[in-house]
Amino acid sequence: MTRFCLGLAMLGWCVSAGWCADPGATSSFVPAGHSSPIQWSSWSPDGTRIATASEDRQILIWDVKTSQVVQRMTQERQSFGRPVWSADNKRLMNSAAASYVACVWDVATGKPLRKLLDYKQVPGAGWLNADGTQAILPCLDGRLCVWDVTTGELKVSGTPRKTFMHSLAANANGTIGLGVGGDNAGLVFDLKTPKILHPLEGHKERINAAAVSRDGTLGATCSNDNLVILWDLKTGQKKYELKDHTTWVQNVSFSDDGSRLASTDVHKTILWDPKTGEKIKSLDIKESRRGAMNGEGKLLATTDAPWVTIWDLDTGKVAKELKPGVSPVRSLAMDGEGKYLFMGSDDGALVVWDMETGTPSKNWSAHGGGITKVSCSAKGDRIATGSNDRTAVLWDAKTGEKLKTFETGILGVKAMSLSPDGTRLLVNNNDQEAMVFDCATGEKKPMGGGSFIKAVGWSPTGEMCWVGSSHDHRALLLDAKTGKPIRDVTSRFAAVMAGAVSPDGKAFLTGNDNFSDGHAIVWNIESGKPTRTLVGHREGVRAVCFSPDGERAATACAAGEGRIWSLKDGKQLALLSGHTREIVAVAWHPKDRWVATASLDGTTRLWDPKTGTELCRLVSVDGGKGWIIATPDGRYHASTDAVGKANLHQSERYFQKSTPDLWTTLFPK
């Protein structure tokens, strides 16, 4: 792999410091994709790029032609609203209503040019002028705010109203605006004054979105009443009611020439002729509620996953997927001898890493949807995968043969664990109930319950199982044969997000989240009382495990950090710092060689359990077809073309030296 090829893959970090900087950005690399489903997308005016915003607190800029992420904007605490481009394609504005923040970014550098902090008017999506120097934002009280991006000056205009506006759409030159909000009406504004020209009344339920034609003559609104209304913005009169949707309509958009209007719901997208109000066609594009049509009106971008699907609106077929080569790792499991690590990710692939050779030995396309949970038997001969496609599957680990498929509840698999002997599968049936499947017969029986089940598991012998839930702050320990409760442990004001039973079966460890920080609690199973509380995480604890000797514990949290503790005195022994997104799973090698953490940043990292030093990170590329191993000092080993396909954001410290014997150097036999 040449230095030139590596240079093509390197993109550099987009932010270096300040309020939007990623922790550890100068010393780590992460996959360039989103780690959570995309909430919003918008096409650049020239149609060459798409900006996407997600709950993972990132805005990514995708090159539509190459499918590569070419820019990344991040901030630590706030999620983003809908991105809005300037007409010259050089600036991008986003606003986050829940956190009172609006920001204008330089697209070329990924750095913020101006931020509107602590903005009590709760900004929603607004309008940005051609060169990105002026913005108009809707206010909480129904007024408009004119923001001079160059000077930072803010002017609030209009008369306060009883209902708020959550978004403002405008024509290309910013003369006519259409605001919608918390009631069933819209408002047409003269943005130059700015004054209200007309109220728009016609919807019976909340309006979700609005669009304005490029010339400012037409407006469109969509609502929870399954209706799209086309308006004459000069008169404020209704032109057409478009009624073919059968569920809530979530988004509307015009083509630049005004010849097409697209409206989207969770089941379909409909194209309309705005001049006649007639339907052009209905397309079976599901989960497209935040679909964005490009300026030509030929393509639609949908975003119900951490990637973008682009549809050809003439054929109704997928034209392209903007999908990073590395997907968030959602779950991790290890066999009882530490020979294999099993990783499940958003792309539906189960990747099996051979920990003796340091390379993936198998990769299976396990599910149509993303894999949410992976569990294996103690011997490692059976693997179970759970998915948001509402199924759990039992596999033969040696052959990859699918042994059994189990239909789960309508919410998909949120919590799952295979018994140590591989004969029973414990899984959530819904938010309130868990059940056990017999892996031979497929029969199932109820096994405990709770309010919003987050985690389930077994004792090392398989004689006991447990169910942990968030809203009632409870973990219920049960006799695995009879289903009768053994112990009920409840933490005051802290959701149970994870759990583990000690190797000797005497202690139970819970990972907890009290919505401001996280901690772990060690419980005596016989008495049901806590014996130790492990405090120090910045956010809720999402994964826990015991060391093989039961004297230490590893915990990991939503802030992307792990910690190793002494259970004798509760003192922290090591900090595992480096992940840039939530850690979802942790596993301890049975011979104490390393602790593994899996994260939504797409990496699985191995740490020295004594010092907390990062030993290496493992990256599965393209569903396990390729792989990368990298160390903090810049050594790496990768399969052919894996680095280029990974679509990584990385510091230039990385990939400095190709080291084929890297694994044996790190872990000599």
Image (cartoon, rainbow, N blue to C red):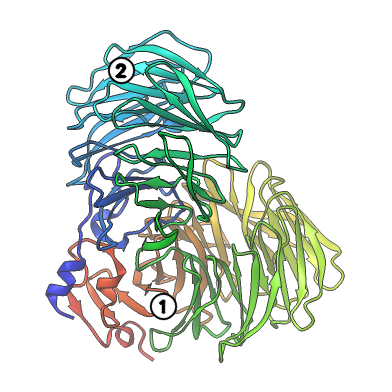
Side of 273 relative to 443 (left or right):
left
Task: Give percent across and percent down for residue 493.
Answer: 65, 41
Q: Is residue 438 above or below residue 193?
A: below
Q: Nearer the viewer, residue 41 or 186?
A: 186
The amino acid sitting under disc 2 is Leu
Side of 535 relative to 524 (left or right):
left
Q: Are marks 2 and 1 in contact (CB under 8 Å)?
A: no
The amino acid sitting under disc 1 is Gly
Q: Nearer the viewer, residue 528 or 258?
A: 258
Instruction: Please report the residue visible at 42 percent of the width from the left and 49 percent of the height from the top.
Output: 56
Q: How far is disc 2 from disc 1 in space, using C-alphas?
A: 52 Å
| Marked residue nearer the N-terminal end (2 or 1) | 2
Q: Is residue 382 above or below residue 388?
A: below
Residue under numbered circle 2: 191
- Quadrant housing the N terminus: bottom left
Q: Residue furthest left?
A: 4
Q: Is residue 501 visible?
A: no
Task: Give percent across and percent down for residue 86.
Answer: 23, 36
Task: Give percent across and percent down for residue 566.
Answer: 53, 63
Residue under numbered circle 1: 624
Instruction: Please report the residue visible at 50 percent of the width from the left and 80 percent of the height from the top.
Output: 364
- Label 2 element class: loop
Instruction: Indicate which label's residue lies in the foreground, 2 or 1.
Output: 2
Q: Residue furthest top?
A: 159
Instruction: Please report the residue visible at 45 percent of the width from the left and 59 percent of the height from the top.
Output: 562
Instruction: Please report the residue visible at 14 percent of the width from the left and 79 percent of the height from the top.
Output: 2
Q: Is residue 648 visible?
A: yes
